Image: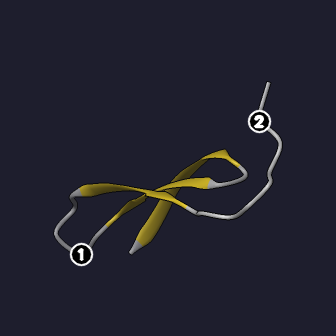
Amino acid sequence: MTVVSVGDGDTLRVRNQQGQPITIRLGCIDAPEMK
């Protein structure tokens, strides 16, 4: 997987080996929202 972007401290956007986008949200993380 390749990291495409980090939206907030708890949200990652990645691409898998086939090029499909995947959004990953981490639970139990108290990260501030980006402004």
Q: Is residue 29 above or below residue 5?
A: below
Residue matched to label 2: 33
Residue matched to label 1: 17
Residue 33 versus residue 30: which sits nearer the camera?
A: 30
User: In this image, 22 relative to 10: left or right?
Assistant: left
Q: Tell me the quadrant of the picture where the C terminus can be found.
A: top right
Res 12 quadrant in image: bottom right
Residue 32 versus residue 17: which sits nearer the camera?
A: 32
Q: Tell me the quadrant of the picture where the N terminus can be found.
A: bottom left
User: In this image, 31 relative to 3: left or right?
Assistant: right
- Residue type marked 1: Gln
User: In this image, 2 relative to 35: left or right?
Assistant: left
* Residue positioned 83% across, 42% down in the render: 32
User: In this image, 18 relative to 34: left or right?
Assistant: left
Query: Where residue 24 sits: x, y (%)?
Result: 46, 59
Helix, strand or loop for disc 2: loop
Res 17 quadrant in image: bottom left
* Residue positioned 33% across, 57% down in the render: 22
Res 28 quadrant in image: bottom right
Helix, strand or loop for disc 1: loop
Label 2 or label 1, whichever lies nearer to me, is 2
Quick one: which residue is furthest to the top in this view? 35
- Residue type marked 2: Glu
Q: CA distance from mark 2 to mark 1?
A: 29 Å
